[in-house]
Amino acid sequence: DADVTQTPRNRITKTGKRIMLECSQTKGHDRMYWYRQDPGLGLRLIYYSFDVKDINKGEISDGYSVSRQAQAKFSLSLESAIPNQTALYFCATSDWGLGPTHFGDGTRLSIL
Amino acid sequence: TQLLEQSPQFLSIQEGENLTVYCNSSSVFSSLQWYRQEPGEGPVLLVTVVTGGEVKKLKRLTFQFGDARKDSSLHITAAQPGDTGLYLCAGAKNYGGSQGNLIFGKGTKLSVKP
C-alpha cells in the first residue's frame, strides 16, 4: 500500500458544488500539506498542519478549507467550486522541519 | 516575492549523455530539496542540501548547493531513459520549517531517448 493515499484520483464536477478531497498516510508523520500544481505555475501550498490541533494557511488558501481529523488524515474542501480551481492536487507529509518528504499520487480535479 | 528559477525548462537528450540543470534565486535559503516527478505520480524527494557548498551524490546524480545558499545544480552522468521526468527544486526559508512553506521552482522537464 502507498504511504500517502489520496481519494479520489480523478473528479469532474460542476461550478458551485462542494467537493472534498481526502488524504490518509501510514508514515506516522505529524506534518501534512495540501498543494496544487498548475502548468506553468509549479506547486503552490494551500494549507498545512503540523499536528492535529494545528492548521495554517499557505500561499493560496482562499476558496479552500481543511480538516485534520486525526494524525493520519487531512482533508481538503472546496466549498463552492469554480473553474479556476481545476488543477492537480497533492497531499504530502513530513516528519519534521524541511518540508514535505512524501507525496501522494494526486487528485486530478476538473470543474466545469 | 521569492522566486526559484529553474533552467532549462525543457531538455531532450540521448541516452548516455551528461547534463546539468540549475536552480537559481536572489534569496538565501536555509535548505534546498530536489524532487523528481513522473507523469501521474507525486514528486519523489531525491535529496536535501543544507550547507553552503555541500555536494551530495546519489548514484549517477550529483547535487550541489551554492556557497551563498542561493542556487543549486543537479548533474546527471550517463543519463538513462529511467531518468526521464520533471525535476523540481524547492527552497526552505526557515530552518526547522517554522512556516512550513517551501518555495518550489517550476521544474525542468527532462526526456532521455534510448
Image (cartoon, coloured by chain):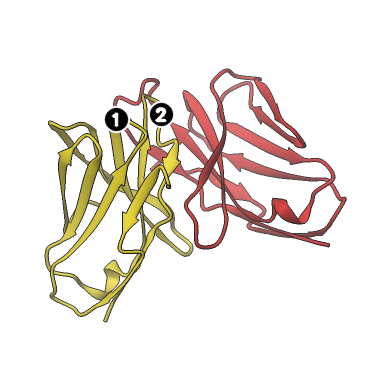
Chain colours: A yellow, B red
Quadrant including the C terminus of chain A: bottom left
Disc 1 marks which amino acid?
Gln
Reply above or below: B67 against A77: above
Q: Which mark is residue A75?
A: none
Task: Work out whether residue B89 or residue A103 is closer to the camera in this orientation and state it.
Answer: A103
Reply above or below: A81 against A25: below
The residue lying at 53 percent from left, 44 percent from top is B44
Image spot of residue B84 (x, y percent): 69, 56
Please state if B11 lies on the left or on the right of A2 as rendered: right
Disc 2 marks which amino acid?
Lys
Which element type, helix, strand or loop, lies under badge 1?
A: loop
The residue carrying mark 2 is: B93
Among the two numbered marks 2 and 1 on one chain, the one whose residue lies closer to the N terminus: 2
Real-space Cα separation, disc 2 to disc 1, in angstroms = 8 Å
Reply above or below: B92 against A82: above
Task: Work out whether residue A43 or residue B82 is closer to the camera in this orientation and state it.
Answer: B82
Task: Work out whether residue A105 or residue A100 is closer to the camera in this orientation and state it.
Answer: A105
Image spot of residue A82 (x, y percent): 21, 72
Q: Chain of mark 2?
A: B
The quadrant where residue B22 appears: top right
Residue, far right: B16
The quadrant where residue A18 appears: bottom left
- Residues at badges 2 and 1 in contact (C-beta under 8 Å)? yes
